Amino acid sequence: MDSVKELILPGSKSSDFDKGSLFFVGNATVILRYAGLTILTDPNFLHQGQHVHLGYGIRSARRTNPAIELEDLPPLDLIILSHMHEDHFDRVVEEKLDRDLPIVTTPHATEKLQKKGFRALHAIATWETQPVTKGDTHLKITAMPGIHGLGILQALLPPVMGSLLEFQDSTGKQRFRIYIAFLD
């Protein structure tokens, strides 16, 4: 596999490794705040009753409203996207999201997002690691295997990844590890 270039984010040198938070927005969308980083997963901000298009004529209706609106999000450092489907990266996000916000995702999703005008894309294949640094926080995002469907469905659906996030301080000491599983 090719070497993945480190993503260096602007920010303060000092990070608090003693506390953090997870905020469930809905579906697979979560805001993770830890050690000076604010990360958004699989952004979906459609409202109850709105439909997502999954391809091949398949649609799904959103059952609940998001817990927060896209416009009310805190300042984000990056997005981790498990795969490119409208229930994980919807048309509201596609229209309103800053095109220069870093997105770590699959090579397939990177290709699709480039065509939509997103510029700060970081593709990682299964078992590859994307290093991220902000101040004295070092984060390793490793793409873990995922299966989007069984049998013939696997060939029809886009590739997916789970994500292992490993936070380290400036000395390299492991401070926190979290696995974001892909379950669909």
Image (cartoon, rainbow, N blue to C red):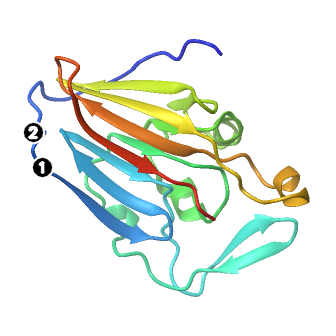
Q: Residues within 10 Å of mark 1 (few under 14, many from 20)?
A: few
Vertical relation: 29 (above or below) 84: below
Q: Nearer the viewer, residue 160 or 40?
A: 160
Which residue is the site of mark 1? 19
Amino acid at pointer 2 = Asp
Real-space Cα distance between discs 2 and 1?
7 Å
Answer with left or right where residue 75 lies relative to residue 140. left
Looking at the picture, how far across and down is residue 132, in whole percent? 36, 26
Q: Quadrant of residue 112?
A: top right
Residue depicted at 81% across the width and 59% down the height = 150
Residue depicted at 35% across the width and 75% down the height = 67
Q: Quadrant of the C terminus?
A: bottom right
Looking at the picture, how far across and down is residue 155, in whole percent? 87, 50
Which residue is the site of mark 2? 16
Q: Residues within 10 Å of mark 2 (few under 14, many from 20)?
A: few
Residue depicted at 75% across the width and 66% down the height = 54
Amino acid at pointer 1 = Lys
Residue placed furthest toward the top: 3
Vertical relation: 16 (above or below) 11: below
Vertical relation: 17 (above or below) 137: below
Q: Nearer the viewer, residue 114 or 139?
A: 139
Q: Secondary structure at mark 2?
A: loop
Q: Quadrant of residue 122?
A: top right
Asked whether disc 2 touches disc 1, contact meaning CB atoms under 8 Å apart, the reply is yes
Answer with left or right where residue 94 lies relative to residue 147. left
